[in-house]
Image (cartoon, rainbow, N blue to C red):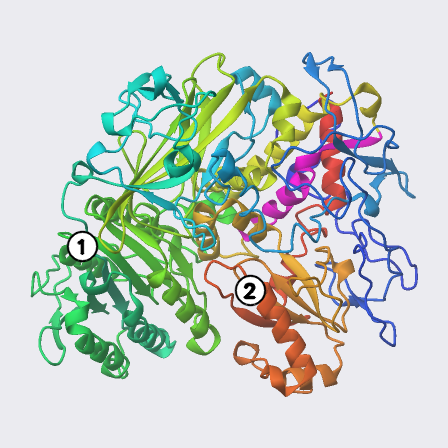
Amino acid sequence: MPAQRGPTPPRLGASPHGARPPPPAGSGAPRSGAPPLPGAAPPPMAPPPPRMGPPGMGGAIPMMQPPGQGPLPPRMGAPPSRPSLPGTTPPSARAGQPFGGGYVQPAVGMSGDFDQPLAETFRALTVSSGPGGGSVISPAELQRPTPEELAEPMRLDTRGDSGRQRGQCPPKYMRMTTNALPNSPATKGKAALPLGAIIKPMARDDAAPVAVVNFGAVGVVRCRRCRTYVNPFVTFIDGGRRWRCNVCSLANDCPSDYICDLDEHGVRRDVAERPELSSGVVEFVAPAEYMVRPPQPPVFLFVVEVSYAAVSSGMLRCVAATLAHTIDHLPGGERTQVGVITYDSTLHFYNLHGSTPQMLVVPELDEPFCPMPGEALVNLSERRDVVKQLLEKLPSMFGATQATEVATGPALKAAYTVAQHVGGKVSLFSATRPTVGDGKLLNREGAGGAANGKGAEGGGLLAPACDFYKTLAVDCSKQQLCIDVWACHSAYADLATLALLARHTGGSVQHFPAFSDVAAGERLSRALQHSLTREQGLEAVMRVRASRGLRIAAFYGHFFIRGVDLLALPNVDEDKSFAVEIAHEENEIGASTACLQAALLYTTTSGERRIRVLTLELPVTSALNSIFDSADVDACVSLTARLAAEATLSASPLTGAEKLQNACLEALRAYRSLCPPHAKTTAALLLPENLRLLPLYTLAAMKAALYASPAEARADERAALIATIANASATEATVLAHPRLFQAYPPLEKGPNGLPAPLPLSAQSVQTNVAYLLDDGAQLSLWFGRDVPSEMLQAAFGWPSLQGVDLATLRLLPPNTSPVAAEIHALVDAARVGRPAGWTPLRVLVQGTSDAPFVRALIEDQTKQMMSYPEFLLHCHRYILSKA
């Protein structure tokens, strides 16, 4: 944490008061940080329900007087029912609004600190004295996402679609941390905001498919100096015979067949007919010079562990059944190729060219080889029946196995040998930590792994144990091979090391801890189907260009960098996101606007070479208030989360959490300098309107499992979360950190999307005789308090009590069974709308027995290591005052 004057604030969000006892029975004193739910009161139930106690206190505490209900403070300049979304410039403030109480305060004039225009719209949270003499912030002033902002899980992916008419790339594909760029390094430093973009190049948009442009004999129109693709922000000159690049300002000649007359405003008369000149996202058909070989066919190579652990857990049965069903839906048509390798302590190849599959066993692990080179991959359309026959037989073929050793490394080397000539996607299904052959891994999570300080923090276990998997991954990337890791382990797997396979090949990591097909089979099956059938690009490369005066300083995501700025992506799909950090090359940018363009060259699954181009043009400014007014809180948090994850890998979880906290503190400190003098009192915490949720989202990210104590989160869980953050879009990262909480039963009034108003993530929102649905973007959790009526349980599950019931196998009764079952099914279905895979797994949790994930999600509450939300706001306030 940066040094500061005055009293030193608590370390990294730690509570300044230690563990706080619960209020006495009947005191009616609400905990700080227990704000009301706007417009939604709990249904009447008799007797008055006890409330769930604060995390770590154990047991229930007597019910406290519910806090007064009331709406969030209105924002100046817009009705409360239509809040401005983060990332948009708020409207001008309306004069005459009373100051304080969380209202937006209008201001005019200049800031004395930086000779800057004063901020015009902001939130001022009143800091007052509490009953014990300490400072408090009223629960009514705590900033939370509005119901409208949380109405859809991917809520901001559609914000600004009207930008297509202005030629801007929609935020579904590319989102900036701020939509006004600082004009100099000094301005950027004063703003103290992360500067970068979150890019999701293959994002799916069924409502507005990306236009495809074929230049034909003209050839793809690009700047001859900086190689920027023609876009809506280039300027046509000399009567349309030349065009000026908006990145490097070079005047380029138009190909003769691309010349068009200009109107009186200097705009081409055919602009409406040219998607490349009117839309910020477009695809060009790539001519032959963009190919170094014929387009790659879709290739799917399945590398499946068949050890005792894989068989007994049901992983083999689940994977084989899913693949047998899914191969009929693989993309690519008649060009698609598939292959299967299984392994335990030996390697098994399959000849699929006959009428029945034939297995060939290779016991050699030091130098694994394919006994049938060139024949391990087959054309799916020609050998579909034989492939299905093999997949259906696999569970019975290894049903009696007693093999416990696994040669994961040699199996992957064999997969490389099989597919290196063509490339493709390798799906590794692993149930056991590699134990024999190259790449074998020891159990680092035992007493020895946590004996030293770094191991105790978790940093040591997040560093790879060896270089074998990174070296193999880099070799695979060079041959256009992507590796997805499906980790279905019952014990420590050293996922931090195995994840390198996905990290350097553009793949993904799917983690199923303590896997059993009964509990997690449907989740694995649906995720696998989506992974294999979603929109994807093959043998891709991506480059991001920025206007003169700016440069791309760093890249984040799963890829391998060729040279200095070319991202190699053997496979890129609709769910993959990447992040870039932007830095200044010059002391000051002289232009009034700057451009950012991402270009993805890839092969479609149908065999066509394409170039997808995303272009943004943004204003350049020296005014800090414009930068803050244009900030996008989701993109800021997403980029900072990636930086923190990298810091965790290179140092420790503590270092990563400190990076998150410091980014928030410095941004709020910088903003305070822009506020009018009368607002900068010691009794007000000032928040930028667009970043009013930054403290909440920062605290939520700091409370993620990645930064939890070793006792609360295992190393494999942390490693999987790092991989998830690396691939997540801006909104997905926010939802992952700050889940949605809904009352499931008794039902509340629902909005147009079928969901009730979300509840604050605090124990004060939770009653022990009510059921709740928690949605963290990747998992739905149906939580039942210990005092839920037996009639509700009977109607939902057919059991009067969940005591002794195996929750892993528990399923809701069909919707037509009872009104309770129908109501909960409807809520679950509504929560799943908009998910990337179209589905989210559901688990059942019961208070006091299996609800650690639920308690952890109550991020507004104090824990043993971390502050509550109100305490964190006060921590921010003290830090800002110490720097004033």
Q: Give the residues in magenta.
A: 683-707
Location of residue 566 by image quarter: top left
Q: In the rendered view, does 639 fall on the left or right side of 270?
A: right
Q: Name the residue that disc number 2 marks.
A: 832
Using a 10 Å C-alpha cutoff, classify the residue at mark 1 as few (fewer than 14 neighbours), some (14 to 19) or many (20 or more).
many
Rendered-image quadrant of the C terminus? top right
Q: First in sequence: mark 1 or mark 2?
A: 1
Q: In the rendered view, does 649 fall on the left or right side of 296?
A: right
Please tell me whether residue 789 is drawn above or below residue 751 in the rendered image.
below
| Residue 795 screen position, x and y as percent | 68, 85
**Circles 1 and 2: CB atoms closer than 8 Å:** no
- Specify whether residue 689 is painted magenta: yes
Location of residue 359 by image quarter: bottom left
| Residue 356 screen position, x and y as percent | 13, 81
Instruction: Inspect the image, locate mark 2, and give the three-letter code of the amino acid beneath it.
Output: Arg
Residue 748: tell me if it is visible: yes
| Residue 100 screen position, x and y as percent | 85, 34
Q: Name the residue that disc number 1 marks.
A: 416
- Residue drawn where x is 45% and y is 78% of the image: 518
Instruction: Inspect the image, locate mark 1, and give the three-letter code of the amino acid beneath it.
Output: Tyr
